[in-house]
Amino acid sequence: MMGIRAQQKEKTRRALVDAAFNQLNAERSFSSLSLREVAREAKIAPTSFYRHFKDMNELGLTMVDEGGLTLRQMMRKGRQRAEAGGSVIRISVDTFMEVLESNPNVFRILLHERSGTSAPFRAAVAREIEHFISELAHYTEATAKRSPELARAQAEALVTLVFNAGAAALDMKRVDRKVLADRLVIQLRMVAKGSEVLQQKMDNK
Amino acid sequence: MMGIRAQQKEKTRRALVDAAFNQLNAERSFSSLSLREVAREAKIAPTSFYRHFKDMNELGLTMVDEGGLTLRQMMRKGRQRAEAGGSVIRISVDTFMEVLESNPNVFRILLHERSGTSAPFRAAVAREIEHFISELAHYTEATAKRSPELARAQAEALVTLVFNAGAAALDMKRVDRKVLADRLVIQLRMVAKGSEVLQQKMDNK
DNA sequence: TAAATTAGCGTACAGATGTACGCTCAAAGT
DNA sequence: ACTTTGAGCGTACATCTGTACGCTAATTTA
């Protein structure tokens, strides 16, 4: 059990993480946040920040980790829904858009820092997305009988398209997001179909 | 003809733009540059910056415009090469990678600010990339007999995959870039093939 | 030739930033 | 009951930022 002291500390730590997440929006990226701003939002003195994180970088990596968690929860949710039958692609896109909508700032940090300026950040995000890709590749290899190379390329393309659409969707109105999602589904079908054809060509040689 | 005075002014202006481009690298994005840093690099006093640009934002938009120019030159080059025959996809990817390698910082600002925090920047980059997409869609619609909607979705997917690979390639060694380019070609073929199949299905109804 | 324009500079200032240091005082450990 | 620990605070400082203001000197215009 956690002592009173540890509980309070955890609470403040969360306040810091939440404060950082809350300051993110279309016009504000993590790297533009200052330590003092975050501390201010979390209602602690700037210098108290150091009781919890070595620096802003460490806070950021914590946030990316939480993003990874969200991604994995999303995968589980998608898989569950897919079991009930229906178009896997459609279900996945809908699930993605739902999760995106209810955790915009989690995706903001993932999508932005993916091509950000901090190498550790990029690596951390890449690692999380890699999970996604390799799981998808494995799944495709097994169920759709693709060669490992093709499965990998296909998975990568799918994930690229999905995340890219996600970044675009973040600051859209619901209506536009719907259009985007529909087009995304078509694009994913292109990749899936095309991959199938390429695989057939290889098999016939 | 340009007077001595106007010439010198233009020279300094270029020095500022070049200074900004030169400060960009994997660890340094445009938005992290300060007016003073740029002025320092260009060897002028900070306050002289204002003789050329209203603020850093205006400098940045100028840089994005130059990026658009590079993109259009690239398209022209790709088209010329493609006329000589061969795989359009392969030729396009190779051209892209070449241009990327010789103008890394131009692509840095385009690729980074595409998902950056400044709305005007995002709009400017989006406009440049939109050229790309619509030209490609038009081309595909004409030569491969696609419906406008499918051509558009296909072009968007292709461009997304290419630019995404470009962002990843920026900070890779030559060898890794080769692997990436080969995989990109496969992915683009998937999209092209898949689009073809989808179009056929539509036509047969 | 005289007057007007202007690119570039130096000084100056208010505001923000990260963080070092030492204090307090409630909780945990003994 | 005592000592130790440590989360949070306030003060302080050096550094950086954007930019206002006024000057100079060379070019352009009249």
Image (cartoon, coloured by chain):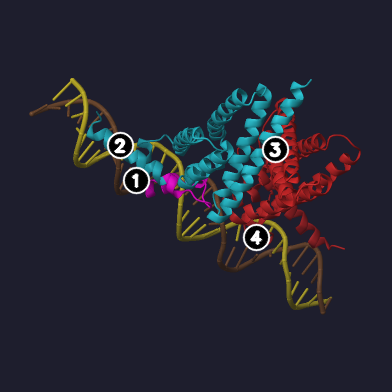
Chain colours: A red, B cyan, C brown, D yellow
Kind of residue at badge 3: Gly
Q: Circle 4: is it few (<14), some (14-19), or many (20+) Cα within 10 Å? A: few
Relative vertical location of residue D2 with respect to residue B194 in this rendering, above or below = below
Question: Dot 1 corresponds to which residue?
Answer: B45
Chain of the residue that carries numbered disc 1 in the rendered image: B
Kind of residue at badge 4: Tyr
Percent position of residue C4, x then y: 22, 25
Disc number lying in front (2 or 4): 2
**Mark 2 falls on what kind of element?**
helix
Chain of the residue that carries numbered disc 4 in the rendered image: A
Chain of the residue that carries numbered disc 3 in the rendered image: A
Q: Find the distance from the CA under tag 2 to the CA under tag 3.
A: 43 Å
Percent position of residue A131, x then y: 74, 52
Question: Dot 3 corresponds to which residue?
Answer: A166
Magenta residue check for B21: yes
Question: Dot 4 corresponds to which residue?
Answer: A50
Where does the magenta region start and end?
Answer: B20-44
Please give the name of the residue rendered at 62% of the width and 24% of the height, measured from the top-left corner: B141
Left or right, residue B171 beside residue B6: right
Does the image show residue A66?
no
For residue B9, the mark is 2
Q: Find the distance from the CA under tag 4 to the CA under tag 3.
A: 34 Å
